[in-house]
Amino acid sequence: MNEQRTAPNEVSRIACIGAGVIGGGWVAHFLARGYRVTAWDPAADAESRLERLVDAAWPALRELGLSDEAARENLTVAPTLEQAVANAQFVQESAPEQLEVKRDLLARIDAATPAGVVISSSTSGYEMTDMQRDCADPSRLVVGHPFNPPYLIPLVEVVGGTSTAAWATRWAAEFFEITGKSVITMDREVPGFVANRLQEALWREALHMVDNGEATVEQIDTAITEGPGLRWPLFGPCMTFHLAGGEGGMAHMLDQFGPSLKSPWTRLDAPELTGELRDAMVRGCEEEAAGRSITELVGDRDRAIISVLRAVGEARKGTE
Ligand SMILES: NC(=O)c1ccc[n+]([C@@H]2O[C@H](COP(=O)([O-])OP(=O)(O)OC[C@H]3O[C@@H](n4cnc5c(N)ncnc54)[C@H](O)[C@@H]3O)[C@@H](O)[C@H]2O)c1
């Protein structure tokens, strides 16, 4: 155990490197949770942009509930990267998505950040293994991939590279949870991580459909917002299809709709529905259901859809 390491629940000082859409969103999130934040961004107009971003986010954060220590005044913009990270107990990097930029920057951050401090990257798709290559101590570097806006969307995907130490991944996951995030910690690096791969599959199919004149932009958006999108806030795609199998759940769903995997319903090739894959899906749904019967799950889903429909109805009234 490194003696200089701060426990995740004892962190009070955070550095945010890169303060655009995502970096600024992280700044707002951490300020709202009562941390002292030091930001650095090389752009000439970075400070005023960051001010505007935090201004725009603050009413929503106040509405959600600020922590007792939350204060806009806890934000400092440092003149150099080295000054920004000098006293940090956690660093979040959100620079442009270019591999060379990330490599150079993470090496500089690593050189200037106190030993034992975890450094996390917001990258949307690079593997940490590729980004940590030039760092003197790559063991403390992790990916902490947020969703826009990071001050409202809870998900953070945490994954290390081949040189990342297991403690760093665990530390980052625990720290993000303490700040109010919902974390999935991945054992393996996959390009794009989990949520982006899922989004991207849908996005590419949407582009194909527009490109082929099969659907309009509006039809595609309506198909999601008035359709499956309403079910996703409570249950993801797997549990949603568990319920599509009626009393037989995922097992019946796969046995019934398995052959459709060969139909041209998407440009994405389906994997072979082996017995192993079938069992993994059925087992996963049973684990996620945690003892709830199909009838109970249907009740949970229906209540959630009613809440979402009402909330969306209210939100739409505000935009009319
Ligand atoms: N926009 C999204 O929806 C989204 C979602 C999740 C993750 N991300 C990831 O977050 C990161 C930032 O994306 P963004 O959308 O905020 O981009 P952005 O263009 O809004 O912001 C990037 C910021 O980095 C600054 N910058 C430029 N060079 C820099 C350097 N060498 N060091 C530090 N800062 C530098 C820029 O001045 C700018 O303010 C990317 O890795 C991106 O993949 C983006």
Image: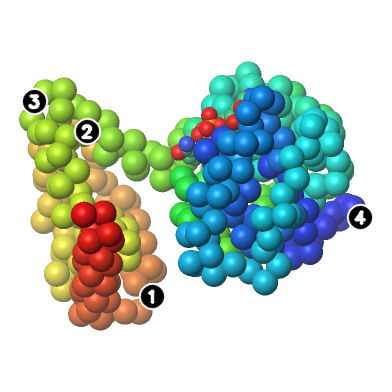
- Marks 2 and 1 sit apart, C-alpha to C-alpha, by 33 Å
Q: Are marks 3 and 1 in contact (CB under 8 Å)?
A: no
Please state which of the two labelled residues, at mark 2 or mark 3, is closer to the viewer: 3
**In which quadrant is the C terminus drawn?**
bottom left
Q: Is residue 215 left or right of residue 309?
A: left
N-terminal label among 3 and 1: 3
Location of mark 3 (residue):
213
N-terminal label among 2 and 1: 2
Please state which of the two labelled residues, at mark 3 or mark 1, is closer to the viewer: 3
Location of mark 2 (residue):
205
Foreground residue among 52 and 203: 52
N-terminal label among 2 and 3: 2
For the image, the number of numbered tags is: 4
Location of mark 1 (residue):
290
- Marks 2 and 3 sit apart, C-alpha to C-alpha, by 12 Å
Q: Residue at x 61, y 40 (%)?
A: 50
Q: Residue furthest right?
A: 3
- Marks 3 and 1 sit apart, C-alpha to C-alpha, by 43 Å
Give neighbour class at mark 4: few <14, some 14-19, many 20+ (Cα, 10 Å).
Answer: few
Quarter containing ligand 1? Answer: top right
Give neighbour class at mark 1: few <14, some 14-19, many 20+ (Cα, 10 Å).
Answer: few
- Give the amino acid at mark 3: Gly
Please state which of the two labelled residues, at mark 4 or mark 1, is closer to the viewer: 4
- Give the amino acid at mark 1: Ala
Q: Residue at x 63, y 48 (%)?
A: 27
- Marks 4 and 3 sit apart, C-alpha to C-alpha, by 61 Å
Please state which of the two labelled residues, at mark 2 or mark 1, is closer to the viewer: 2
